[in-house]
Image (cartoon, helix red, strand yellow):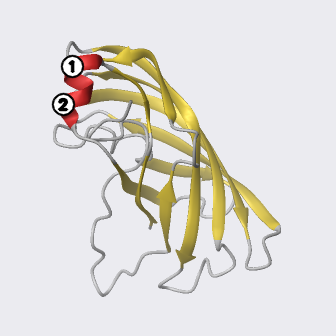
Amino acid sequence: MHMAWIIAVTAAAVPQSPAEPATLTCHVATPAGSPLAFSPSVGLTPRRVTASGHLEFTGCVSPDGTAAALSSGWVAVKATLQTSCTSTRRVRGSAVITWFGLDSRPVGTSKLRVGADRPAIQRPADTLLIGSVTAGPLTGERARGGVTPATALLGCATQGMAGLAGSGRVTFG
């Protein structure tokens, strides 16, 4: 089952000012046949949920040139959050990003501390990749992005949501 938002992934890419180009921007998606998992299922009533799964970063571009060696990545994410079909808050978790270069060989591993306290209402899943890189490539950079699911909110409201597949963008910097 899919939802109109992705609780655990990333916040919608915020445009960078011309004076501050992004360090890295990537396309992000759940792997084919492997949606993010929610336990217990997300429903109409807010409750504490664990979100876990993998994401793929592809087509990474470094507008400022400082992260040009990072062309793609594989992400393992796990977070707890207070969530319902329409809102999310109190997000805490982590993600490990294995980065790959243009030759598809591993070039490093980053750790992302995930955390968001402000409620996300229109796209609650945009809270899963909001955070700061604490180790490895991009240390000290802020992450934000979003994953848009293929289906609407109605399915979550009527049947609950145990998993979510989708795609979007993530920006570091």
Label 1: how many Cα within 10 Å (few below 14, some 14–19, many 20+): few
Amino acid carrying mark 2 in the image: Leu
Amino acid carrying mark 1 in the image: Thr
Q: Position of residue 90 (x, y in %)?
A: 33, 26
Q: Position of residue 25 (x, y in %)?
A: 47, 71
Q: Position of residue 19 (x, y in %)?
A: 32, 86
Answer whether labels 2 and 1 touch (C-beta < 8 Å).
Answer: yes
Q: Residue at x 30, y 57 (%)?
A: 12
**Pick the front one: 152 or 169:** 152
Disc number for residue 158: 1
Q: Residue at x 48, y 66 (%)?
A: 27
Q: Secondary structure at mark 2?
A: helix
Q: Residue at x 44, y 57 (%)?
A: 142
In the image, residue 133 above or below residue 68:
above
Image side of residue 33 versus residue 106, left or right: left
Image side of residue 91 versus residue 153, left or right: right
The answer to whether any part of residue 13 appears in the image is yes
Image side of residue 83 versus residue 105, left or right: left
Disc number for residue 50: none
In the image, residue 90 above or below residue 11:
above
In the image, residue 35 above or below residue 131:
above
Q: How many marks?
A: 2
**Pick the front one: 53 or 129:** 53
The quarter of the rendered structure image containing the C terminus is: bottom left
Q: Secondary structure at mark 1?
A: helix
The quarter of the rendered structure image containing the N terminus is: top left
According to the picture, the residue beneath numbered tag 2 turns out to be: 154
